[in-house]
Amino acid sequence: MQPGKKPPLTRGRDRHRIAVLVVPDTVALEVAIAQQVFGPRMYGFARITGDDTSPYEVILCGEEEHYVLPSGADLGRLAPLDVLREADTVIVTGLENPFAQRSDELLQALRDAQAAGARMVSFCGGAFVLGQAGILDRKRVTTHWVLASEFREQFPLATLQEEQLFIEDGNVLTSGGIFSATDLSLHMLAVDLGYAYSNDFSRLLVSAPVRPGGQAQFIKDSIRIDREPPLGSLTEWIREHLDEPLTMAGLAEHEHMSERNLARKFNQAVGMSPYDWITRERVNQAKILVETTDLPIGQIAAMVGLGSAESLRRNFSRLVGTSATSYRRAFKAEPALELA
């Protein structure tokens, strides 16, 4: 198991240097993912596969020399922020508090790293730090889906696609929830070392090299306590009548306004047309029924107002990124196995 090529070397070193930023609220698991994928190879596997030397040098750095993270993890002594400026790749991992404002010194170090040609990477909520540094402006990006509203509000110049597991836009790469860090890391291996090597490495991790469906299949609006959008009385009424024919004329009559005025106010409040919002809500309700019942797809389609099994399948695949059948296999709760 040997890579077909080497990662780019831009600084005259014999190994590609990856600087992993550590802050006081860093998520330790995501640091471990970066270390496991890019750091020294595990001896037990290496002696079997022959993949005994990583072409990467992974350095943890921070504003201070040492942090004990909220999880209790102690990552040891950290290198200074100057390491960011000299790195081939910079990784900002997930954060316990992604909304916290970071220091000017830290953000300037990230900007300097990008200006020097470093590949800029974020895992999960780490995108908020790259956003504060202005690195995500006019880029297609992703982050954890549950943070999408806050991200859009803080960084309107970025194009957020929260349904994606990861996105590469030029020299800026971002990933979604915690385990999407593995998906992005494997993608980076494929780009740097070849797809054959990345696929073999994924086999050692017992992880799919490319997971289907993206983050869209994991999105569940009701997890948020503030899920109720503006026009709450109308949207709640729509949810209660999803199985019925819903037309613009009917909605406008319910709200005692013109269709044009309703369409304008709805788009301003919710960010999409009434038709698109209703379709999304019908698919969300279908996800719940697919996950919690054994009802046939055709029956579920009728119950949520999508009409036919074909209509449900088409809209489900478009909005969730996977088929209803695959979603049911992944998320349907099964009885626990009885122990003999």
Image: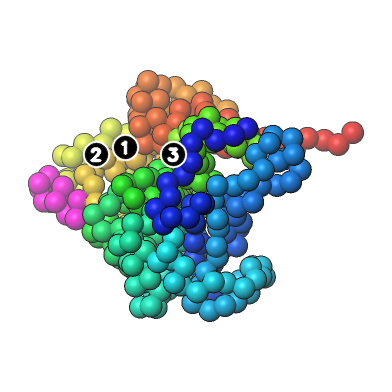
Crowd class of label 1 (few under 14; some 14 to 19; many from 20; radius 10 Å): some
> Which element is circle 1 on?
helix
261 over 292 or under it: above or below: below
172 over 274 or under it: above or below: below
Residue placed under numbered mark 1 in the picture: 279
Could you say where residue 148 lies in the image, as x and y percent from the top left? 37, 56
Q: CA distance from mark 3 to mark 1?
A: 37 Å
- Residue 256 is covered by the magenta coloring: yes
Give the mark count: 3
Q: Amino acid at mark 1?
A: Thr
Residue lying farthest to the right in this orientation: 340
183 over 58 or under it: above or below: above
Q: CA distance from mark 2 to mark 3?
A: 40 Å
Query: Does 296 sit left or right of 145 as displayed?
Result: right
Crowd class of label 2 (few under 14; some 14 to 19; many from 20; radius 10 Å): few
> Which element is circle 2 on?
helix
Query: Does 29 sit left or right of 269 as displayed?
Result: right
Q: Quadrant of the N terminus?
A: top right
> From where the camera sits, is residue 9 visible?
yes
Magenta stretch secondary structure, dominant: helix
Q: State if disc 2 and disc 1 touch (CB < 8 Å).
A: yes
54 over 299 or under it: above or below: below
Magenta span covers which residues? Answer: 255-268
| Residue 150: quadrant of the picture | bottom left
Crowd class of label 3 (few under 14; some 14 to 19; many from 20; radius 10 Å): some
Q: Write the residue at 52% across / 69% down.
A: 61
Residue placed under numbered mark 2 in the picture: 275
> From where the camera sits, is residue 147 visible?
no
Residue placed under numbered mark 3 in the picture: 191
Q: Amino acid at mark 2?
A: Tyr
